[in-house]
Image (tube, grey):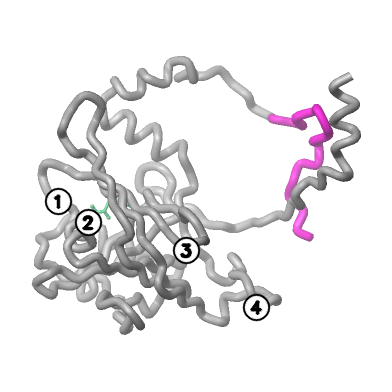
């Protein structure tokens, strides 16, 4: 077992939580966040809601132009059915090609970025004309998918072939101006390279995959250290909890 926990928690004792300072924005003032400028909310939220996994998304436009770009408003939604979500921020200046392509073709692949090619992946986030082929720009290698047209990223050790399940446009409160689109993708195939699996062969070893995450600003994060914490067994703990109730 990898033990990186503080080991100070006990029933009814939160453990050692060092460095608890005062709040700048209290929960009761959460609505203030909606009234702050978009830029402030963006900075505060993207630096606080961390680390965010990154979907490296490959799509093809209706006209056949391939596209590749990273998105960190990304999460696993469910394993049954296997599903992921990605959110696109919509600027007045320029639509996101990835969003347009997914909505029009209903197909995309999500590839996990390992540290070995993070610079190439980062280069694809350049705000370029829709006709730009980020595969050429980045030097990354397209590999045919099994069931969707957009290719997989050969350099990725974990890739998902997805079809659009549904999407939701989101407007700022009391406006009809769409600022964000959330896309749900149903995973049709999942590809995992054998050499990133752990000893059981059933799960991915983060030390081998070396995935990068997104932090605030232009920061990326590493998963450098993992520790295990078994879930609590109620049969063992329940009696003590009932004792606390008096
Ligand atoms: C690591 C990283 C994460 C990003 N995450 C998002 C995101 O979650 N949503 C978004 O709209 N843009 C995000 N961006 C910006 C897009 O990648 C960028 O706008 C890109 O040009 C979009 O490409 P496209 O127009 O070809 O789809 C991110 C950029 C980087 C470098």
Q: Nearer the viewer, mark 4 or mark 3?
A: 3
Does 199 appear in magenta? Answer: no
Cβ–Cβ below 8 Å for labels 1 and 2? yes
In the rendered structure, which disc, 4 or 3, sits on the residue that comes first in sequence? 3
**Left or right of residue 203, residue 62 in this image:** left
In this view of the protein, which residue sits in the foreground, 119 or 56? Answer: 56
> Dot 1 corresponds to which residue?
95
> Dot 4 corresponds to which residue?
201
Cα–Cα span, label 4 and label 1: 41 Å
- Say above or below: 160 vs 92: below
Cβ–Cβ below 8 Å for labels 4 and 1? no
**Left or right of residue 11, residue 119 in this image:** left
**Left or right of residue 239, residue 151 in this image:** left
Cα–Cα span, label 3 and label 2: 20 Å
In the rendered structure, which disc, 3 or 2, sits on the residue that comes first in sequence? 3
In the rendered structure, which disc, 4 or 2, sits on the residue that comes first in sequence? 2
> Dot 2 corresponds to which residue?
99
Q: Position of residue 8 (x, y in %)?
A: 81, 36
- Say above or below: 25 vs 93: above
Cα–Cα span, label 4 and label 3: 20 Å
Q: Quadrant of residue 93?
A: top left
Mark 3 neighbour density, 10 Å: few (under 14) some (14–19) many (20 or more): some
Residue range corresponding to the magenta coloring? 1-17
> Dot 3 corresponds to which residue?
82
In this view of the protein, which residue sits in the foreground, 245 or 228? Answer: 245
In this view of the protein, which residue sits in the foreground, 176 or 139? Answer: 176
Does 7 appear in magenta? Answer: yes
Q: Position of residue 172 (x, y in %)?
A: 24, 30
Cα–Cα span, label 4 and label 2: 35 Å
Q: Is residue 120 visible?
A: no
């Amino acid at each position: 077992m990898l033990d990186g926990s503080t080991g100070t928690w006990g029933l009814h004792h939160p453990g050692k939580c060092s460095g608890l300072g005062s709040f700048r924005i209290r929960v009761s003032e959460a609505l203030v966040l909606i009234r702050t400028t978009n830029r402030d909310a963006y900075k505060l939220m993207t630096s606080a809601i961390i680390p965010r996994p990154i979907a490296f998304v490959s799509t093809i436009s209706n006209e056949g132009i391939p596209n590749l770009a990273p998105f960190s408003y990304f999460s696993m939604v469910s394993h049954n059915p296997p599903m992921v979500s990605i959110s696109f921020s919509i600027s007045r200046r320029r639509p996101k090609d990835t969003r347009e392509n997914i909505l029009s073709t209903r197909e995309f692949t999500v590839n996990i970025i390992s540290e070995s090619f993070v610079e190439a992946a980062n280069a694809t986030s350049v705000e370029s004309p829709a006709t730009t082929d980020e595969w050429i720009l980045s030097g990354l290698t397209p590999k045919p998918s099994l069931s969707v047209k957009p290719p997989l990223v050969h350099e990725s050790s974990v890739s998902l072939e997805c079809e659009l399940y549904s999407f939701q446009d989101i407007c700022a409160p009391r406006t009809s101006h769409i600022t964000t689109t959330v896309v749900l993708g149903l995973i049709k195939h999942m590809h995992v390279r054998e050499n990133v699996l752990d000893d059981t062969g059933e799960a991915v070893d983060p030390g081998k995959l070396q995935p990068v995450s997104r932090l605030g600003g232009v920061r990326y994060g590493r998963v450098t250290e993992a520790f295990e914490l078994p879930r609590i067994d109620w049969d063992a703990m329940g009696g003590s909890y009932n004792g606390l109730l008096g």
